[in-house]
Image: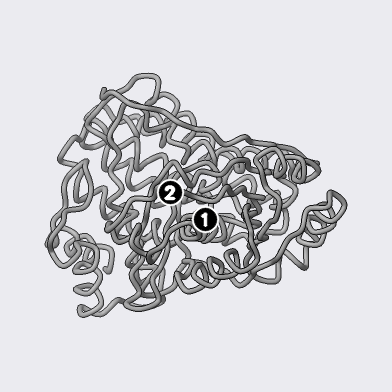
Amino acid sequence: MKDFNYYAPTQVVFGADAEEQIPQLIKSFGGTKVLIHYGGKSAERSGLLQEIEQRLKDAAIPYVKLGGVVPNPRLSKAQEGIDLCRKEGVDFILAVGGGSVIDSSKCMALGVPYSGDVWDFYAGKAQASACLPLAAVLTIPAAGSEMSGGSVITKDEGELKWSYDDNLCRCKFAIMNPKRTYTLPAYQTACGVTDIMMHTMERYFSHEEMGVTDALAIALLKAVRQYGPMVLDNPEDYYLRSQIMWAGSLAHNDLTGCGTIGDWATHNMEHELSALYGVAHGAGLASLWCHWANYVMDAKVARFARFAREVMDVDAIDDEVAAREGVNRMRAFYHSIGMPASIPALIGRKATEEELLLMAEKCSRGKTITNGNFKQLAYEDVLSIYRAANE
């Protein structure tokens, strides 16, 4: 195991009436004027946005609104929000939605006190020293951004989808009401299940071993594998929705990575898929993971064999046989919840060779960096995985 410094400061308010506490929590963290940031019409149609507005009015907390966040959130929208916050004197940002809205809110919160271009943080040119306080009202369990320090933003020019991680932009609190997820489409729910599992798997596939952390990761993966299909069949079951919602936070608050070194190559490669094709992040991850696994497995077959036996219920004695069967069962699981397991299944056609070359080039930052830690992947390795996923 490796030494670690664990930090998870977000206050979680979980339950059917969690929204009632929004005004007092905003005040407790010093908020006096709020920007409500959200995505499309769903927040309005569900009545959630109006409910939050009324609660702020009743508590005499002034606010402004900014909607229009899209999946794979755009830098241009965050820059619009930064300008609005400065103009209106906003000192607290409330994200109402899923990972895209929360990530956009983090970008705005970092950008308001910064004198330069907020993209500097995502491009690795600067490190933040200040951040507006922000919080989340979660409606889509998937990204785990409500309890993580990371955000992912797409720069409109060049379709660059890059991430930035900083404890400064962790949410002060997260409002989590499972009832708000009842109306999620099945596809979006399945994408969330995939993303939750991948956040844990990115941390689990490590050369470092940490007994307690590994046990937590395995338990979380088994639970989501069990409850994911069940919630698709019973979308308004409070208990099942609760399990998925809480799992999403636990998968990405770094708990399942304490003492290990995560990989993240699949995430990095997927960012290029969703930047180029505009696909859902979870679906993109499903289209790549099995092909990544087969490519890197020889770096530590025993790790994949343990995953196969303890998560995917494989009983083969030989490690390599077990490991391969574990990947096959993961592919079958993706199919069972309606997720693609290849690029053609994801986008409806084969990617062109030119598109594969472009994604590999961008993923390796012009062939200057490697991706992953389980097995470091140079440009040619990334391209090989894209090609395998394109069959």
Name the kind of residue labelled 2 in the image.
Gly
Q: Which element carries disc 1, helix, strand or loop?
A: helix
Q: Residues within 10 Å of mark 1 (few under 14, many from 20)?
A: many
Relative to 380, is 28 on the left or the right? right
User: Measured along the vertical axis of the image, is residue 340 above or below residue 234?
Assistant: below
- On the image, the x and y values in percent for residue 371 come to 21, 52
Q: What residue would you read off at disc 1? A: 109
The residue shown at (34%, 35%) is 204
Name the kind of residue labelled 1 in the image.
Ala
Q: Which element carries disc 2, helix, strand or loop?
A: strand
Viewer-nearest of labels 2 and 1? 1
Cα distance in 3D space between marks 2 and 1: 13 Å
Q: Nearer the viewer, residue 313 or 159?
A: 159
Q: Residue furthest top?
A: 211
Q: What residue would you read off at disc 2? A: 150
Asked whether residue 282 is in view, the answer is: no
Numbered tag placed on residue 189 in the rendering = none
Q: Residues within 10 Å of mark 2 (few under 14, many from 20)?
A: many
